[in-house]
Image (cartoon, helix red, strand yellow):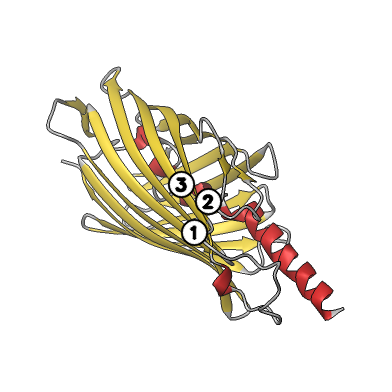
């Protein structure tokens, strides 16, 4: 009876984690670094930028999920077009590394990004982007602690799988608005493991459509509503809505996700640095067990 119970528990752990391990939460970073889910944002309104972020779920004193993000983008020497509020380079090159740890699963994603920006007029830019994606999914069985470690049904060996894929993005930016469309994992494949005991884990194509608008309330106070339409592994249609107040030296925002959770964030600029914190709060336990917290530091060179 104990052997059967332990096997059921292990199967549940593998099943639940397998559904989420290859579903990196790109949308959690959209207000910090939109280049992650839309390659056309590389070097938009900047000559060089770098971001680092950590995303954790805190539940009852432990952290069942940990995400890490590191990105860098730069504009090679070339023509830059003057806009009403700065300069826009023609080309942007970027690199992003994403890492997720959830239970025995570890996912690593590398993005190589190219963006081309077309100046339509002094206020409007059309941006197009492509990304090459390398994904790795590993299962670390030694991180589990079964009561009967000699159970032959436990996985052993090298449990690694790789996928090569790509992404596309486009955006049109005005002085007060932005509309963007992107697709990641254009040709989604399956994670096929060396260990024949592990069934293939299917990947899926990810879609994002986002828009935002900026209203000037006072001289240095702006109001910014935004919305993102997307899909997920479990749902064909999801959405995020948000509103933010930008006080020039402080930005605060509040949003709602269709998975029935709310998020609150703040961004504090200090010279060329941007410090950011986001709190994700589930309204029910079907989306998230516990609360999530994202800390990030960004740097941007605009001239």
For the question of whether residue 216 can be seen, the reply is no
Disc nearer the start of the sequence (3/2): 2
Q: Separation of disc 3 and disc 1 at Cα? A: 11 Å
82 to the left or right of 177 = left
Pointer 3: what residue? 135
The residue nearer to you, when weighing 68 against 291, is 68
Q: Quadrant of the C terminus?
A: top left
Which class describes the residues within 10 Å of circle 1: few (<14), some (14-19), or many (20+)?
many
Q: Is residue 37 left or right of residue 144?
A: left
Q: Which mark is residue 160?
A: none
Q: Quadrant of residue 99?
A: bottom left
Extreme residue toward the right, this view? 1
> Residue at 35% of width from left, 26% of height from top?
127
Considering only vertical position in the picture, is 127 above or below 162? above
Q: Tell which tag, 3 or 2, sits nearer the viewer.
A: 3
How many residues crowd mark 2 within 10 Å: few (<14), some (14–19), many (20+)? some
């Amino acid at each position: 009876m104990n052997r059967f119970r332990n096997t059921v528990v292990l199967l549940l752990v593998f099943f639940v984690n397998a559904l989420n391990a290859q579903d990196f939460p790109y949308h959690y970073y959209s207000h910090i670094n939109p280049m992650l889910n839309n390659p056309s944002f590389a070097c938009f309104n900047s000559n060089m930028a770098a971001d680092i972020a950590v995303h954790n779920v805190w539940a009852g004193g432990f952290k069942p999920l940990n995400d890490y993000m590191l990105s860098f983008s730069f504009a090679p020497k070339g023509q830059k077009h003057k806009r009403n509020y700065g300069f826009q380079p023609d080309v942007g090159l970027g690199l992003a590394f994403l890492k997720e740890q959830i239970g025995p699963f570890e996912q690593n994603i590398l993005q190589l990004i190219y963006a081309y920006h077309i100046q339509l007029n002094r206020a409007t830019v059309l941006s197009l982007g492509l990304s090459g994606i390398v994904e790795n999914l590993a299962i670390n069985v030694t991180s589990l602690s079964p009561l009967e470690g000699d159970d032959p049904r436990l996985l052993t060996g090298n449990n690694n799988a790789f996928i090569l894929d790509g992404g596309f993005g486009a955006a049109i930016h005005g002085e007060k608005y932005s509309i963007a469309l992107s697709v990641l994992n254009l040709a989604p494949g399956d994670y096929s493991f060396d260990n024949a005991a592990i069934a293939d884990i299917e990947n899926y194509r990810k879609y994002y459509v986002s828009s935002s608008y900026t209203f000037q309330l006072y001289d240095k106070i702006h109001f910014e509503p935004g919305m993102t339409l997307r899909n997920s592994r479990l749902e064909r249609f999801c959405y995020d809505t948000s509103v933010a107040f930008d006080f020039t030296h402080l930005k605060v925002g509040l949003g709602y996700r269709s998975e029935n959770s709310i998020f609150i964030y703040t961004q504090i600029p200090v010279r060329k640095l941007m410090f950011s914190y986001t709190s994700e709060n589930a309204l029910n336990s079907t989306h998230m067990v516990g609360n999530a917290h994202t800390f990030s530091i960004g740097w941007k060179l605009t001239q």
